[in-house]
Amino acid sequence: MAKEKSFYSCTECGGISHKWLGKCPHCNAWNTLVETAAQMAGASKNRYSAMSGLAPSSEVASLSSIEAQDVDRTPTGQEELDRVLGGGIVQGGVVLIGGDPGIGKSTLLLQALDGLQRTGQKTLYVTGEESGAQVALRARRLGLDNSQVSVLAETQLEKILATLESQQPHVAVIDSIQTVYSDQLTSAPGSVAQVRECAAHLTRMAKSSGVSVVLVGHVTKEGALAGPRVLEHMVDTVLYFEGETHSSFRLVRAIKNRFGAVNEIGVFAMTEKGLKGVSNPSAIFLSQHKEPVPGSCVLVTLEGTRPMLVEIQALLDAGGPSPRRLSVGLERDRLAMLLAVLHRHAGVECMDQDVFVNAVGGVRISEPAADLAVLLAIQSSLRGKPLPTGFVAFGEVGLAGEVRPAPRGQERLREAAKLGFSKALIPKANAPKKPIEGVEIHAIERIEEAIQWVRNQN
């Protein structure tokens, strides 16, 4: 039986029940009643009060009469993290960061808090998964022996809020939100009700007091943030920490950011002294071949506002009656479509070949501008002849065989020139009006033109 200080609300219609039922008595929907704290939700008759206070109330006004103000940011000292955040921590902002266990979330945030406190910011690290001694041991491994970051080992929401109110830190980290629980609810820590209510209360506190809060979240087996989807809607910024277990490199990717660009990435390298920012990430994703090899093509991709060079590798081998198509780091379904375009419009047959495509370095590329580089790498592997030295390519390939332009083409070309690449095959619509020093540009309109140009180079 539920305690008097909690009730159950329907996620479909918002109806209220004082006990859990399999079917909502108001809308007859099954399994939609979720425990809610009456104290947090206010009066139980108001179905919308559970989310109240996440943003300060104001009078109705027209957009033209509202004065727009720039958001003040505080750099964390981690340049790559600041890039993803849009320049730094925002006062009163709430950041949710998720990633696989052991990927380095706690390490990065502890380093960021140390950098903030050295600039005079008051910081608090709330740990629910480790003791204070374990956090101190990690700090020593990271070379932060004399760090003045305050640490609180606590999981009860009410005690955490009381500490935040008394200490008044500028930045607080909650590691992790799945370990925090409220006495107002009877469900176990990590449940949908606990995560939702605790996150809502912490967000409300951040908006009202100006404390910047960073929530660490667990992820599911599929890599998505665990807990209710509303958790991502509550916060201002959602970051994903990505990386392969066998690699020392880590990527922090912004999925949502109310104060900056989305799909921005920061690149880190895991060292003995913690995570270090990588200022030139293109060097990670480019293999060092002494001589050009067949099946390799360098792509200039765009991650947020940052152009990066990534090596695309393709391997074709004689297959059986059912040849395989496998891609790693690229869209798998798109590979079959590209092979059909290559056959129909350029006359290159791969029907009896196993086709394997890989983006070097574990990077994941989702933009269609990788199409041209993928097809050129496949053609190179099939013929057994490498592409020219210092060659890059980018462009989307349509089903009609046309090569479509990619966004911000000139920035991609300038990045390639900066890293010493001298030849570029690009869509005609991306051809710059003024030549770019050091890069010989070849603009094409169709895929058959690209294949013919490559053949003429050998």
Image: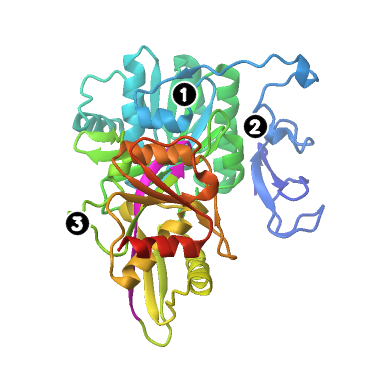
Please tell me whether residue 403 is drawn above or below residue 455 in the rendered image.
above
Q: How many residues crowd around disc 2 within 10 Å: few (fewer than 14), some, or many (20 or more)?
A: some
Tag in front: 2 or 1: 1
> Mark 3 highlights which residue?
291
Which disc number belongs to residue 264? none
Marked residue nearer the N-terminal end (2 or 1): 2
Q: How many residues crowd around disc 1 within 10 Å: few (fewer than 14), some, or many (20 or more)?
A: many
Residue 14 visible in rendering: yes
| Number of marks in picture | 3
Please tell me whether residue 274 is drawn above or below residue 71 in the rendered image.
below
* SS under mark 3: loop
Amino acid at dot 2? Met
> Mark 1 highlights which residue?
89
* SS under mark 2: helix
**CA distance for labels 3 and 2:** 65 Å
Amino acid at dot 1? Ile
Q: Which residue: 51% across, 64% down?
A: 334
Q: Residue furthest top?
A: 120
Does the segment drawn in magenta span residue 315?
Answer: yes
> Mark 2 highlights which residue?
40
Amino acid at dot 3? Glu
* SS under mark 1: strand
Q: Nearer the viewer, residue 125 or 23?
A: 125
Q: Nearer the viewer, residue 183 or 132?
A: 132
